[in-house]
């Protein structure tokens, strides 16, 4: 629940009434939340019993109760595999790139649009920048593969302008993969991600801007001292949520754009799970990898929340 | 009077209802095909006939996306169709217990067609417990086997390259790249100004055989996957070839051609769709592949009338200089290989397996085999002096995808047991195998091309098929017991071979090759040991 500190007192006062009395008073609300609770239980908590496969040499023919119990062997195997450790690194690296540059780009675009006075122009830019969000990743990667091919637009442009003399092997150079994913993700999501910042900015009290102007603040001063503090709480809430998702660097783009040449830098945990679990029938190993990912995600989420609390900011949990 | 008529009518209706109920109840059978395909139309001619005769309607699901992932999803949810074709990964569904053993259903009395179909091959087809899960979809020949063209692996070259060079015989690796180089020097671009690519290598996923398989053929062996088996010594010594010194010259040659610009870097990162698109555009001059793997590209080129851009299969071997002066004789064509564990199995979810077996039994009859492979006499072919023939239109219809959707039961036929080779009256079982149809109805360009070589059919470029080794073809061996090591074995090749081909100079090439051999040796050893044991087991089973 998102709650600012002044509200804390009344909540405590209400607690004295007793849990069941409060429950009864809010029966309509409780009833309304039942479907969501059921949904979460059925699709998020109930399937967790499948984690048992992480400790087994799981065989679909025998099922979870008859498969051989192997304890932590699957985990041991995973952490001795270079490609699993690489996939952890890749997941975190691409996530961080997305998080840092994605957020910066979104905020930058929001500020720029916020400063634009022409309504028509602002609308047009906003629409154009968020449209790619609705494109399927398959299409985006298909386009990227054409644009970045050795005879593609990017190489042609660089060759014609004389910046390079041999085409760059964008799609097969492993060191370039993270950057490419970052650029494509930002292009695809920047408009969408900026919407929430734009809406926060429109809710900033205009009198603050007026007051700042009267005090002699120029455009940059106003951005720095009015706009940015205005979106701070949104930024923190989004940051906490995103840190919880840090272990999800996406799956489609790495799966579609990865190839044997860039595998060391393209394979994320999700791709790894798919490769071993579904394609190679090593369900136990794949479950162990997925379980590891979930546990790290939970730890990350709680630490981010804890730090935010310490900084006396809005918290999520 | 009117009343009487009404009563009689009602009686007649009741009677006909009762009759219908006595015949087998109409059912809908769910089907999964491990390949992509086109849904037949609702008024499809053959499916209608099947429905009328057997009361069976099909609900077909084709593969969309990755096969292993699709099968894995079906296995984890036990979501099996009645007729289950696991495509190239059928071992997975067998090992997961998705299919029923067919042996109890097949007997000489009850199912004579099926029984005769498999009886000679049973020792090879059943597993250690004597179970048979899948009746092979291809490779069981009746009477004489017919081979008009190479349907499997070969080096391919655009026909116009040979036409331009005056129809030379191309038999070795050096001759092959030599003619491509010369053609490229004279014709750098096609009519539209698009530059030609000299040689393409598809490396994506399981189709990486285009990258990793050629060496065995250059050494004069048919397709055994990733191993070479010594069939002459009597001990069936099995070894991986990719890490051996005799593999190095091939990749060295590719490296040289890469440096000369014949091979484009993009080939190592392209996916199957991009590869097919490139071949279909007619700008790729050559590649190593298997005929069936780029059938859509061939069809597209033929439909566009670009016959000079279609490919001819060539059986290349190493030049003597690469193998200590030894002259290698090519052996690309193998004896008919029963396509073990490929085709339809019946899943444990099927409610009436007996009926499915009866369906296959009936479809294997001569009458239905003719309907499935040739169509309806008078509509899809005609008979003259006992020979089954086709007009040009009828022949062209057969390769028209939208015509197929309306008039053939392709989706079922492809995965069902079928008769191949020659009928008892001398006609070919497959319409495409019939020699008259094959030569008379091919394009004028192809006729002129073959005539220039003095050949009747593309298979004349090849030596006659050899006898099939008792173990079959080694690529068919199920590798799931060493799945993880096998994955690594392949992944190391996927990673290193492109790097090796893209080496900048000889020193770098040698260093890369040495690093590759060092990295692959441990898994190659595990793989060799496993394959050796399996080959011996199969030989023993077959000679029992």
Image: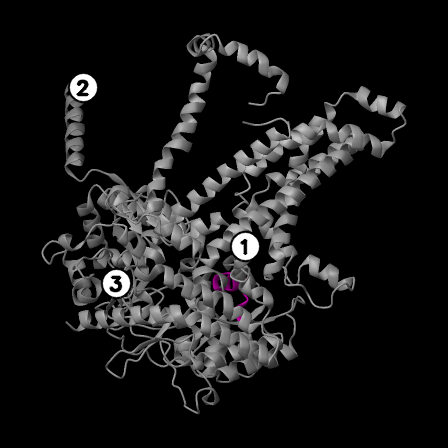
Q: Is residue B473 above or below residue B85?
A: below
**Front residue of this view, candidates A119 and A273:** A273
Dot 2 alpha-carbon crowd within 10 angstroms: few under 14, some 14 to 19, many 20 or more: few
User: Which residue does the numbered mark 1 point to in the structure image?
Assistant: A266
Q: Which mark is nearer the camera, 2 or 1? A: 1
Image location (x, y in percent) of residue B429: 28, 65
Magenta span has B305?
Answer: yes
- SS state under label 1: helix
Q: In terms of image quadrants, where is residue B284? A: bottom right
Mark 2 and mark 3 lie on one chain; the one further toward the N terminus is: 2
Residues under labels 2 and 3: Cα distance? 56 Å
Q: Residue B419: which numbered mark, if any? A: 3
Does residue B310 show up magenta in the picture?
A: no
Name the outermost residue toward the left: B109
On the image, which quarter does residue B139 sit in?
A: bottom left
| Magenta part of the chain | B298-308
Q: In the rendered image of this protein, does residue B416 appear above or below residue B458?
A: above
**Left or right side of A168 for B172:** left
């Amino acid at each position: 629940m998102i709650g600012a500190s002044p509200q804390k007192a009344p909540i405590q006062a209400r607690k004295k009434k007793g849990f069941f009395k409060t429950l009864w008073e809010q029966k309509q609300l409780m009833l309304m939340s039942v479907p969501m609770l059921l949904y979460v239980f059925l699709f998020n908590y109930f399937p967790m019993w499948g984690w048992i496969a992480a400790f087994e040499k799981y065989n679909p023919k025998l099922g979870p109760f008859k498969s051989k119990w192997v304890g932590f062997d699957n985990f041991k195997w995973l952490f001795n595999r270079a490609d699993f450790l690489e996939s952890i690194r890749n997941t975190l690296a691409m996530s961080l790139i997305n998080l840092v540059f994605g957020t910066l780009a979104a905020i930058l675009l929001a500020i720029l649009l916020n400063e634009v006075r022409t309504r028509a122009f602002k609308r047009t830019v906003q629409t154009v920048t968020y449209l790619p969000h609705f494109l399927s990743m398959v299409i985006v990667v298909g386009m990227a593969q054409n644009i970045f091919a050795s005879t593609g637009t990017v190489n042609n442009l660089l060759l014609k302008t004389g910046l390079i003399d041999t085409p760059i092997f964008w799609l097969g150079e492993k060191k370039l993969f993270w950057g490419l994913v970052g650029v494509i993700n930002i292009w695809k999501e920047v408009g969408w991600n900026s919407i929430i910042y734009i809406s926060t900015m429109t809710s900033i009290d205009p009198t603050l801007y007026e007051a700042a102007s009267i005090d002699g603040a120029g455009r940059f001063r106003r951005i720095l001292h009015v706009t940015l503090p205005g979106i701070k709480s949104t930024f923190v809430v989004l940051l906490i949520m995103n840190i919880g998702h840090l272990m999800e660097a996406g799956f489609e783009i790495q799966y579609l754009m990865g190839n044997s040449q860039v595998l060391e830098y393209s394979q994320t945990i999700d791709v790894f799970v798919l490769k071993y679990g579904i394609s190679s029938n090593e369900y136990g190993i794949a479950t162990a990898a997925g379980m590891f990912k979930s546990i790290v995600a939970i730890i990350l989420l709680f630490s981010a929340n804890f730090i935010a609390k310490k900084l006396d900011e809005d918290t999520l949990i | 009077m009117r009343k009487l008529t009404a009563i009689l009518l009602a009686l007649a209706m009741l009677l006909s209802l009762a009759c219908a109920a006595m015949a087998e109840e109409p059912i809908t059978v769910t089907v999964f095909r491990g390949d992509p395909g086109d849904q037949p139309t609702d008024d499809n001619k053959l499916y209608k006939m099947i429905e009328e005769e057997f009361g069976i309607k099909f609900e077909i699901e084709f593969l969309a996306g990755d096969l292993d992932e699709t099968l894995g999803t079906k296995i984890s949810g036990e979501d099996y169709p009645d007729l289950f074709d696991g495509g190239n990964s059928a071992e997975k569904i067998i090992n997961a217990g998705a299919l029923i053993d067919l042996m109890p259903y097949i007997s000489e009395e009850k199912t004579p067609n099926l029984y005769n179909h498999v009886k000679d091959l049973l020792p090879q087809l059943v597993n250690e417990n004597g179970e048979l899960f899948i009746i092979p979809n291809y490779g069981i020949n009746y009477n004489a086997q017919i081979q008009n063209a190479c349907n499997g692996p070969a080096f391919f070259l655009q026909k116009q390259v040979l036409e331009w060079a005056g129809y030379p015989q191309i038999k070795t690796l050096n001759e092959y790249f030599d003619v491509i180089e010369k053609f490229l020097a004279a014709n750098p671009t096609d009519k539209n100004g698009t530059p030609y690519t000299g040689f393409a290598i598809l490396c994506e996923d399981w189709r990486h055989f285009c990258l990793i398989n050629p060496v065995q053929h250059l050494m004069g062996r048919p397709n055994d996957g990733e191993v070479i088996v010594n069939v002459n010594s009597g001990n069936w010594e099995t070894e991986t070839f990719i890490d051996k010194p005799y593999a190095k010259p091939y990749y060295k040659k590719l490296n040289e051609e890469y440096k000369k610009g014949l091979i484009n870097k993009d080939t190592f990162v392209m996916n199957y769709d991009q590869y097919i698109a490139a071949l279909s555009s007619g700008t790729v001059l050559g590649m190593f592949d298997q005929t069936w793997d780029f059938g859509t590209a061939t069809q597209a080129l033929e439909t566009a009338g670009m016959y000079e851009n279609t490919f001819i299969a060539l059986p290349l071997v190493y030049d003597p200089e690469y193998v200590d002066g030894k002259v290698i004789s090519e052996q690309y064509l193998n004896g008919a290989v029963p396509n073990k564990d490929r085709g339809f199995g019946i899943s444990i979810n099927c409610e009436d397996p007996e009926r499915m077996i009866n369906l296959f039994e009936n479809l294997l009859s001569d009458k239905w085999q003719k309907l499935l492979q040739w169509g309806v006499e008078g509509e899809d072919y005609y008979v003259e002096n006992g020979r089954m023939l086709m007009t040009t239109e009828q022949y062209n219809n057969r390769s028209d995808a939208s015509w197929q959707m309306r008039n053939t039961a392709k989706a079922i036929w492809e995965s069902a047991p079928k008769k191949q080779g020659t009928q008892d009256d001398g006609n070919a079982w497959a319409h495409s195998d019939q020699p008259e149809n094959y030569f008379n109805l091919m394009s004028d360009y192809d006729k002129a091309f073959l005539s220039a070589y003095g050949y009747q059919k593309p298979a004349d470029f090849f030596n006659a098929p050899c006898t099939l080794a008792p173990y079959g073809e080694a690529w068919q061996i199920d590798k799931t017991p060493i799945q993880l090591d096998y994955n690594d074995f392949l992944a190391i090749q996927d990673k290193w071979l492109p790097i090796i081909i893209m080496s900048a100079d000889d020193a770098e090439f040698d260093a890369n090759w040495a690093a590759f051999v060092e990295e692959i040796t441990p898994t190659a050893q595990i793989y060799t040991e496993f394959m050796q044991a399996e080959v011996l087991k199969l030989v023993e089973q077959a000679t029992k």
